Image (cartoon, rainbow, N blue to C red):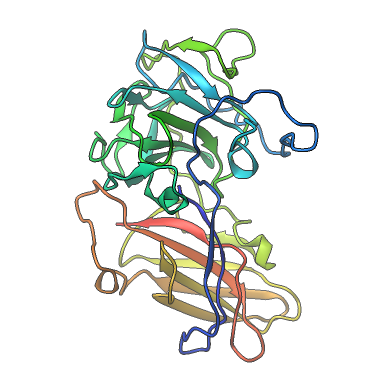
Amino acid sequence: MSPLIKTALPEHTKAGVFLGALLIILLFAPEIPAARGTADPDTEQVEPERTHAADLRMKLPYPAGMSYPVIQGIGGSFSHSGYSFYAWDFAMPLGSPVCAVADGMVVCIKQDSVEGGTHPSLRQKANMVVLDHGNGIYTEYLHLQANSVKVREGEIVRGGQVIALSGNTGYSSRPHLHFQVQNGLGESLRATFLDVAGDGIPKEGHIYTSANDGSGVSKFAGPSPFPLTAFAINGVILHLTDMPGKLMRLGSTYSISGTAPPTSREVVLFVMPEQGGVPLLEKRARVQDSKFELSFTLDGLRARVARWNTDGTQSNLFHMAIVPARADGTYWSEFSYPISVR
């Protein structure tokens, strides 16, 4: 789900009062397409060690017979680094059909933005669709045209199905589609296309014709589970949970068990708005022998946000984290996990 936000959260008292400033860094900042050119050895992108999404059989993200050039590919020197290392930018005219690369479930939609350009303030303005293909594998489609999404949150879509129209929203200098395969944490994964000759990897500067008629692609494997290592950066590892990977239900109660650092006495689960701010939901649990169990109900969110979508055409986006509390009850999280609530 994008934009995925890495958050250095302010310390809170038990009453949830801010004691510091909120720092939000976009990990999936939509990029400005640019030719890669000759790489400087001192600035060459370093390939991260990540899982290959070999189980996902997919085809190019536009209709069969259509051809588009790749204007930035894997490790593109302009912006494809970090979480977006394994990504492709396809130059497309405004309003071009964008297709699901394989069968999946819609878990995130943003289509209310009409803004696009090169000012950094536009990084959070990219319209998008995120599909869950099961087994912890997702695909993300960015910079879509405003109000062009053809599917609804929770809908099962088929490979080759038109899900939206391409656009130029967000941090972008020209119309294009940013596409990547990613895990639940939003880290892009190595992947190949069935309809790309050779090694299956589109190369920057080349034009590719799609054969995406929906045949031969992966079937939907069922909703992905919540990643048990989502909060490992905070020292918290989940052992069991019934939380879904992305799309959660308002009013539902979820259970979690896991481990925290040996010195921890308490862990805190909190949910906050997508744009940051004071947590809207907070749940604490005691830690004994490094183990904890907690349950929480996703309620009270709708009344505390300015706008709530009920028809599935726009996701209600939030961020969640679990973190050990300090002895005085305050806490600090290095990472928050994006979720949709409906």
Horizontal relation, residue 63 to residue 70: left or right: left
Q: Quadrant of the C terminus?
A: bottom left
x 26%, y 48%: residue: 112
> Where residue 90 sits: x, y (%)?
46, 23
> Where residue 167 sits: x, y (%)?
33, 32
> Where residue 38 sits: x, y (%)?
70, 23
Q: How many marks?
A: 0
In the figure, residue 81 lies in which quadrant? top right
Q: Is residue 58 above or below residue 53?
A: above
**As drawn, which residue projects farthest toward the right?**
41
x 51%, y 89%: residue: 14
Horizontal relation, residue 75 to residue 274: left or right: right
x 41%, y 63%: residue: 275
Between residues 95 and 308, which one lies in front from this camera angle? 95
Can residue 126 be seen? yes
Between residues 147 and 262, which one lies in front from this camera angle? 147
Q: Is residue 35 above or below residue 27?
A: above
Q: Is residue 118 above or below residue 220?
A: below
**As drawn, which residue projects farthest toward the left?**
311
Between residues 315 and 58, which one lies in front from this camera angle? 315
Can residue 107 be seen? no
> Where residue 180 sits: x, y (%)?
52, 33
